[in-house]
Image (cartoon, coloured by chain):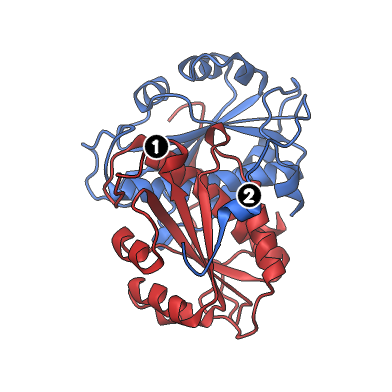
Chain colours: A blue, B red
Amino acid sequence: MREIELRRSIRKYKSKPVEMSIINSLIESARLAPSGSNTQPWHFIVITDDKIKNDVATVSHNQKWMLTAPVFIVCVADIASRIANSEDIELDETSPQFELKQIIRDTSIAIEHIVLNAITFDLGTCWVAWFTQKEIRSVLGIPGNKFVVSILTVGYPDENPNPRRRKDLKEIIHINKW
Amino acid sequence: MREIELRRSIRKYKSKPVEMSIINSLIESARLAPSGSNTQPWHFIVITDDKIKNDVATVSHNQKWMLTAPVFIVCVADIASRIANSEDIELDETSPQFELKQIIRDTSIAIEHIVLNAITFDLGTCWVAWFTQKEIRSVLGIPGNKFVVSILTVGYPDENPNPRRRKDLKEIIHINKW
């Protein structure tokens, strides 16, 4: 599939802005993702404000390259989709709930729909997940019963990286049993 | 994107087998998925053996419809990709490790590459995750430091379901802050 073959993690972007109609199309593709019991646990915070982008990059280990992207999409999994009265839950990196694993799985599917659909608009993206829940939630006012799965940087690529090394197919494929 | 719009969860398949070359193409698309620090934590067990398919469906709450699919792909996340000397770890639904969340995220991305690429071959798939780690690992001889993220059923669709209801875009999109 063309989009899968062309996808790269892009860490340098042109300053050209991205039309909001395109951002809506990207999130529309996330909206169509499958999820367990159709729970749709995902939320997407679209960030174009320079001050807020700066705060987000700062809590992402101050990765300066992120700021070349005109748009960030902060991708959030909501455990309220699976646990009633979850308001008192404070999720973090070592939370044990099975439901957290389920919403991370489903939100990751939706995020990758954005990543692949971006290719059809000649946009580049990069998954960024180097932050703590506490810090990223604090910067954006996200309640404790949500888990930030990823920040996607989005913009027109200003680099053309080679594919990274992958394991051989025979290292990852098994037939009929482990 | 065509594949995203056409994708449905298919729970009824034609008996027509799927060529192994196509299965290899599907797993090749998973192989190209991005992963944190390029750790590629995924493994795929391709099951065409009727006895083993039956055992897998049985521990999946005996969902008989699964057996209409000629192929299952059991999708496994390996915590050894992130934790050294992990052989004594016995993962289950409530394991707290951050690394488990990371490998579930990355393996989910790779699985959805299979799901979307399947559409280009006119194949249908369904994510199945209704089993316990203990039972599915036991059936397939998978070590305890691996976590089964999903079983994908794969085959030529023998149904054409309508899209399921989705939340409106405005329920899942936020601008600049939560």
Q: Decide which of tag 1 and tag 2 comes sooner along the chain.
A: 2
- Is residue A147 positioned above or below B171 on the image? above
Q: Is residue B115 left or right of residue B170?
A: right
- At 51% across and 70% down in the image, what residue appears? A176
A19 or A72: nearer the viewer: A72
Q: CA distance from mark 1 to mark 2?
A: 20 Å
Residue A95: x percent and y percent?
28, 38
At x 40%, y 34%, the residue is B84
Q: Quadrant of residue B6?
A: bottom right
Residue drawn at point x = 26 percent, y = 42 percent: A96
Q: Nearer the viewer, residue A72 or A165?
A: A165
The x, y position of residue B175, in whole percent, is: 52, 31
Q: Which residue is mark 1?
A: B99
Chain of the residue that carries numbered disc 1 in the rendered image: B
Q: Nearer the viewer, residue B58 or A98?
A: B58
Q: Is residue A146 visible?
A: yes
**Left or right for A32, reference A97:** right
Per the image, the residue denoted by label 2 is B31
Q: Position of residue B26 (x, y in %)?
A: 65, 60
**Contact between labelled residues 2 and 1, with CB atoms less than 8 Å apart:** no
Q: How dense is the environment of label 1, judged by Cα within 10 Å: few (below 14), some, or many (20 and up)?
A: some
Amino acid type at mark 2: Arg
Residue B171: tell me if it is visible: no
- Going by the numbered disc 1, the residue's amino acid type is Glu
Secondary structure of the residue carrying numbered label 2: helix
